[in-house]
Amino acid sequence: MKLLIYVQKLSARAQYIFGLICQDLLGLDISITEQKEEFSLYEGAKFSYAQEPIGNELFIQSNGLLSETGISEKQTDFITFNGMPAFFGTSDKRSVFSFDCFAAAFYLVSRYEEYLPFKQDEYGRYPVIESTASKGGFLRIPLVNIWTEMFRKELLKKYPDLQFVERKFKFVPTIDIDHAFAYRHRNIFRTIGGIGHTILRRRWKQLGVRIKVLLGFARDPYDTYDYIHQVHKERHLKALFFILFAQSSRHDNNVSLANRVFRELLKSLDRRATVGIHPSLGSNKRFSRLESEVSGLSDALGHKISISRQHFLKVSFPKTYQNLINVGIKHDYSMGYASEPGFKASIADPFKFYNLINETETALTIHPITLMDVTMRDYYRLDASTGVEFSKSLIDEVKAVKGEFVSLWHNESFSESGRWKSWRQVYEEILSYATRK
């Protein structure tokens, strides 16, 4: 059965958000019309999205955002609807929702607020404390999914024969490689500098490990790749690896791109998993640098790459995503905050990037990340025991809406050394919990 939607003005924004909620999340076949007569004569499932209803159909009052073009400050006064946070409240009592759920979902998923002026953090990122989700207290809730389920129930009340897609929870493990090796395969100047730095700080144990690694008597602590492959293989999972493939700079300092062992490692990862680019922080300012990094990694692997995650999760709207599209990236995994877990776009599902400047839906699919190792260990100062329970609560949120949980870890987090002692066990318990039937 097709779902017919009436709108007063058929816009790119309306087509985008109805497509996301009704088609992608609910699995419905939809058609949108501006014609009142066509809508009135239609005898199947339908609802109107306008200032007022046409008849006695299912009706949701519009606040006008989806009919607009351009970007302006919006009031997001929070209300509670069915026990959940909401905003963009409406006044018509005939509306099944007391807020415009489609406009609110569009505002959150498009990252509308990041197009407005804001004070950047030290890396040029949007600060979490400025976000609507943080101010509304729903950063750890996949609110768009929850609103979608509320809408599904209203449709079923009116049209009990409607058939919806059967959703399934999905866990996606992803690994960033900022430093392929801790001590090996560094140039002589960086090696000497590292040794001197360790001595000045009197880190004698670390110095001992470094010397043993350099002399070939111990494995490099960041060389955790066999373990990573094995732990995923045991659970029938395939990880995604994002490689920092950039010229060395202050914030981008992987091993030399010309290093033979590094390139052999890349080919080994590519054979056993899926490899993507981890664009450098500097590539946000220079498109030519992004082009060079993507083409360089593609040449090293012998095929084009199509997935990415920004170093430091640095995204500038819409420039970063548009640049990725221009170099052939199809899927990006940068949607998240470094300092906070949860749902930056308030959704636990992949979605297409909508460019608010051009008012167009693009072909780039964004996969929101839910939890990062560094968030737990460095920002929240959690130890290994509390990290497990912290992770489970977020997995439960995504399982409840049968969404996609994307975890972000680093190869060094499995080193079992320094601040990452015992975190292998944390990761294994997370995997077991997430893949439990």
Image (spheres, rainbow, N blue to C red):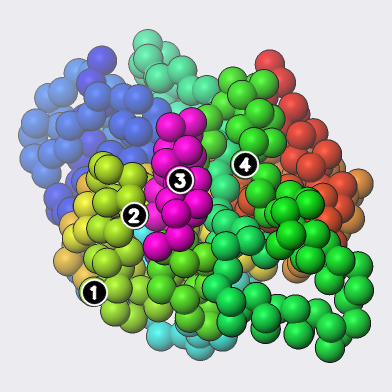
Q: Secondary structure at mark 4?
A: helix
Q: Amino acid at mark 2?
A: Leu
Of residues 315 and 181, the one nearer the viewer is 181
Q: At which x and y percent is residue 436?
A: 71, 21
Q: Which residue is mark 4?
A: 225
Q: Residues within 10 Å of mark 2 (few under 14, many from 20)?
A: many
Q: Secondary structure at mark 1?
A: helix
Q: At which x and y percent is residue 280?
A: 43, 70
Q: Amino acid at mark 3?
A: Glu
Dot placed on the residue nearer the N-terminal end, 3 or 2? 3
Dot placed on the residue nearer the N-terminal end, 4 or 1? 4
Query: Over which residues does the magenta segment extend?
Result: 258-279
Q: Is residue 412 something that shows in the picture?
A: yes
The total of numbered circles placed on residues is: 4
Q: Nearer the viewer, mark 3 or mark 2?
A: 3
Distance (Cα) linking label 3 and label 1: 26 Å
Q: Amino acid at mark 4?
A: Tyr
Do residues under tags 4 and 1 come within 8 Å of each other at their CB atoms? no
Distance (Cα) linking label 2 and label 1: 14 Å
Placement of 233 over or under 179, stated as above or below? above
Q: Which residue is mark 3?
A: 264
Dot placed on the residue nearer the N-terminal end, 2 or 1? 1
Q: Which residue is mark 1?
A: 288
Q: Amino acid at mark 1?
A: Ser
